[in-house]
Amino acid sequence: MRYIGNKTRLVPFILDVVRRLEPSVGVACDPFAGTASVSRALKRQGWTVHAGDLMAFSYALQVTHVELDRTPRFPVSALGAGEQGGRPGLSYAAILRELEGLPPAHGFISEHYSPDGLAGGRHGRMYFTPENAGLIDAIRQRIAEWRAEGLLDPARCQLLLATLVEAADRVANTTGVYASFVKSWQPNACRRLELRQLRPTSRRNGGGRCTAHRGEAAGRVAAVGTMDLLYLDPPYNERQYPAYYHIPELIASGWDDPPELRGKTGLIPDEDLRSDWCRRDRCEAALRELLGRADARHILLSYNDEGLLAPEVIADVLRETGDADSYRRTGTDYRRYRSDGDGPGRTYRRDRVREQLHYVKRP
Ligand SMILES: C[S@@+](CC[C@H](N)C(=O)[O-])C[C@H]1O[C@@H](n2cnc3c(N)ncnc32)[C@H](O)[C@@H]1O
């Protein structure tokens, strides 16, 4: 999924740093997991990973890529097939075909995020074509029904939700984030929604059971307890994630209790999702609080060199919290994530930014 701060391209660099710090694998925590790119890479190396994030769609991705060790089969006898290919249940592929074949339905997404809906039309919201919005509604509704009927356990339900979030993202009429929609249909938005299989990461020999979590990072870290590696990748600027990803969040969390939407883009209520890490006056205290609750041998913090916290401040906080002499900082340049070009409201200072990894060891 296209995601601000996604570390997929930096994973080799991060793994390389981790290997130098700690040649053997152990327990790791990634409480700002986002797309789970780092969590799944660590799991692939044999780490026992405990991921977490505030957002519901991240939770779905974490369950898919971190908690599940293999693609499950689906015991959905309601579909009329108790067995397929001599094995009980249906394959993931068969379930996706079934979901893709549903007739479009008019639901919350059609109503609010496509020009065919009363509210969507009134605001000119063009996030999805009417056909794709109807498909998202029909698929989301069917997943909820299967779950309510007890045909899907929580993990299988999250796998299907993650699959839908990724599929919707590919046909969203945006330039990468949901803070705005494009006023004409983009080629990707005109393609029919397609559910593509996601691949859970298998557990390496010796790796323990990995877990997913939705909630505050500091609480997650405290709950995991003793760990070998704490990898922190918090937001580094004032952009609150729920304002940029409100539609994936809605698809993942559903609308049993329909939210009251705000503004031209149909933002969801986000008081519970707002992060202190995105506030200049609170982020240092948030870092101190989290570190105060962490019982970790190695602490690695990814932070952008244009972030709210100056590198010198991070260095001071880490030195205070660990073995001061072990503090190190290393960095790599990479192309900036751009969801849109420079415009009157936004002029990037430079095209490349430096991602820094701050490290401290605890005695
Ligand atoms: C820079 S992104 C992480 C990107 C991730 N490493 C990846 O590769 O996709 C920061 C993440 O922190 C999450 N977040 C922000 N504040 C949080 C908090 N207080 N507790 C937990 N997660 C938080 C956001 O939802 C976002 O997914």
Image: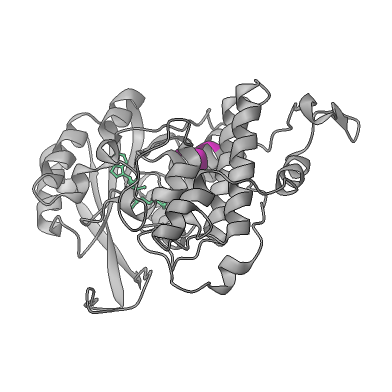
How was the colour assigned to the protein in this rendering?
one colour
Query: Is residue 44 at all visible to an observer of this figure?
Result: yes
Left or right? Give the position of 60 relative to 296: right
Q: Residue at x 67, y 53 (%)?
A: 196
Percent across and percent down for residue 320 are 10, 40
Percent across and percent down for residue 157 are 59, 32
Q: Residue at x 51, y 61 (%)?
A: 172
> In terms of image quadrants, where is residue 148?
top right
Left or right? Give the position of 79 relative to 316: right
Q: Viewer-proximal residue, 152 or 298?
A: 152
User: Is the residue 342 above or below the residue 234 in the image?
Assistant: below
Q: Viewer-proximal residue, 57 or 106?
A: 106
Percent across and percent down for residue 232 are 30, 45
User: Is the residue 128 above or below the residue 246 in the image?
Assistant: below
Percent across and percent down for residue 124 are 42, 63
Q: Viewer-proximal residue, 80 or 301?
A: 80
User: Is the residue 330 above or below the residue 211 in the image?
Assistant: below
Which region is colored magenta? 59-63
Total number of numbered discs in the rendering: 0
Judge whether residue 62 is colored magenta.
Answer: yes
**Direction top: furthest residue:** 150
Judge whether residue 260 is colored magenta.
Answer: no
Q: Viewer-proximal residue, 351 or 206?
A: 351
Q: Residue at x 42, y 35 (%)?
A: 258
> In terms of image quadrants, where is residue 284?
top left
Query: Is residue 24 at all visible to an observer of this figure?
Result: no
